[in-house]
Structure formats: C-alpha cells, structure tokens
Image: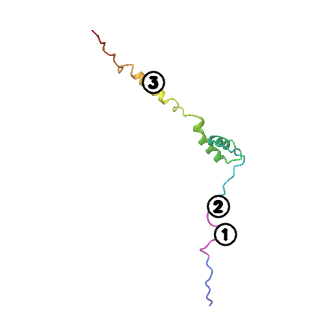
Amino acid sequence: MTNQQPKRQHGGARAGAGRPTNTPQLLPDMPKTDSPLEWLLALMGNADADVRLRVTAATAALPYMHARKGEAGVKSEAESAAKQASRGKYAASRAPVRLVT
C-alpha cells in the first residue's frame, strides 16, 4: 500500500462551475448630455438597445412628459367646490348695519 489517498470527485473548484459573470452591455451612440430626460428619450429611441431596457427608459420618462389625468387641476377643483359650498345654506351672513349718530 502506498501513502497516497485516492482522488475524490467532490470539493474544490471546477472549470465552468459557479455563477456566470455578467458583462455590462455597452450602449453605442448615446448622447453626452446633462439632461437625464434627453438621455432617457435617446435610449428609448435607440434600436440597438435591449427592448426591456427601452421600455424601462420609457416608463421612467413618462411622468416628465405627460401629467396624470386628475393631477393637473386638483387645487382648482377644490377651490371651486369650496366656493360652491359657501353660496348656499352655509353662506356667510351680511354684516349688521351700523348707524352713526
């Protein structure tokens, strides 16, 4: 018998094992700009970019391009409702007449 242990098939690093490395995708022809909105719009229109990335850019740019339907006039609607309520039963009464003698 020899003093060497038999090689076992478990433990240690193996070629191809483990989590694959994620290489970042480079986006060609993206403008150098200080405005994030312009950059998102350029990414959204870039046909070379991944579709999921383009949809994410469109979703991120959406609130800056279009306001929500009910969001635009919330204050003005509340003010007009308050004026309408103050005209009827709950209207302020007139001040008493002061007679100066």
Q: Which residue is mark 2?
A: 21
Point out which mark residue 15 bears. 1
**Local secondary structure at mark 1:** loop
User: Would you say the residues marked 3 and 1 are in contact, meaning their CB atoms lie under 8 Å apart?
Assistant: no
Vertical relation: 71 (above or below) 16: above
| 53 is within the stretch colored magenta | no
The image quadrant of residue 8 is bottom right
**Magenta span:** 9-21
Task: State the residue at coordinates (61%, 63%).
Answer: 19
Of marks 1 and 2, the one in the foreground: 2
- Work out which residue is located at the far left of the displayed protein and give it: 101
Vertical relation: 45 (above or below) 86: below
Point out which mark residue 80 bears. 3
Gap in Å between the C-alphas at discs 3 and 1? Answer: 72 Å
Figure colour scheme: rainbow
Quick one: label 1, few (<14), some, or many (20+) residues within 10 Å?
Answer: few
- Which residue occupies the foreground of this view, 53 or 76? 76
Of marks 2 and 3, the one in the foreground: 3
